[in-house]
Amino acid sequence: MPEHPSLSTARPSVSRETHRRAMRTHPAGVTIVTLDGSDGPVGFTASSPSSLSAEPALISFNVGISSSSLAAVLEARTAVVHLLGEGDEHLALRFAGPSHLRFADTALWTRAETGEPLIHGGRVRLRVALDRLVPAGDHVLVIARLLDAWFDDEPADPLVILDGGFRSVSSSAH
């Protein structure tokens, strides 16, 4: 596939405020990304994870260049993306807060056999290999290959963020 030149210099983008206002109107699934850093477990709340490809199985997520977790993401080979459900708001807030408190309560997490931190909670856990890191504005786009998936036996409704607040989305058919 031929490379396309960046179009970002062809036109100026809207302001940060306009971007944020527009994107806040679109619901996004709430997740926690965890990985093993050189100084211990690292994790952060993200609403950017998305399915990218079914064959091969790829997902993507973003991490801000000013994030305290970026250095660990740049060094990591694998991570776990936890898809959160209704009732997991406290976890989303914890992992969006101060980094030194995220893993302070050892009752909230354990380690996978492969070493990555696993949060107790969520609907699905996706173990991924971090394949590509792409600088993109004030974030880094992470493209990751799905290695394994664990599903909750009785999953709660999905947790989303909309207009800066958490909401659950009924997964039952109407």
Image (spheres, helix red, strand yellow):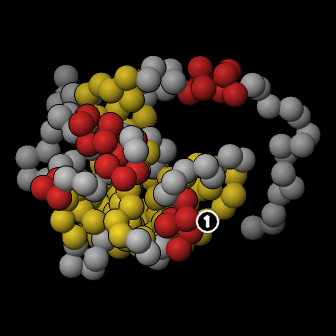
Q: Dividing the image into 4 quarters, which one contains the C terminus? A: top left
> Which residue is rendered at x = 26% and y = 42% of the image?
91
- The residue furthest bottom is 114
- The residue furthest left is 154
Q: Is residue 86 above or below residue 59?
A: above
Q: Where is residue 162 shown, x and y percent of the image?
A: 42, 24
> Which residue is rendered at x = 15% and y = 39% of the image?
156
Mark 1: secondary structure: strand
Q: Quadrant of residue 16?
A: top right
Q: Where is residue 133 shown, x and y percent of the image?
A: 61, 65
> Which residue is rendered at x = 17% and y = 34% of the image?
87
Q: Is 88 situated left or right of 28 in this image?
A: left
Q: Dividing the image into 4 quarters, which one contains the N terminus? A: bottom right
Q: Which residue is mark 1?
A: 133
Q: Is 69 situated left or right of 4 in this image?
A: left
Q: Is residue 25 above or below residue 81?
A: above
Q: Where is residue 142 shown, x and y percent of the image?
A: 55, 60
Q: Is there any visible trace of residue 32 in the rendered image?
A: no
Foreground residue among 40 and 168? 40
Q: Is residue 58 above or below residue 61?
A: below
Which residue type does callout 1 highlight?
Answer: Leu
Dot 1 alpha-carbon crowd within 10 angstroms: few under 14, some 14 to 19, many 20 or more: some
Q: Is there any visible trace of residue 172 in the rendered image?
A: yes
- The residue furthest right is 10
> Which residue is rendered at x = 8% and y = 53% of the image?
153
Q: Quadrant of residue 167?
A: top left
Q: Quadrant of residue 9?
A: top right
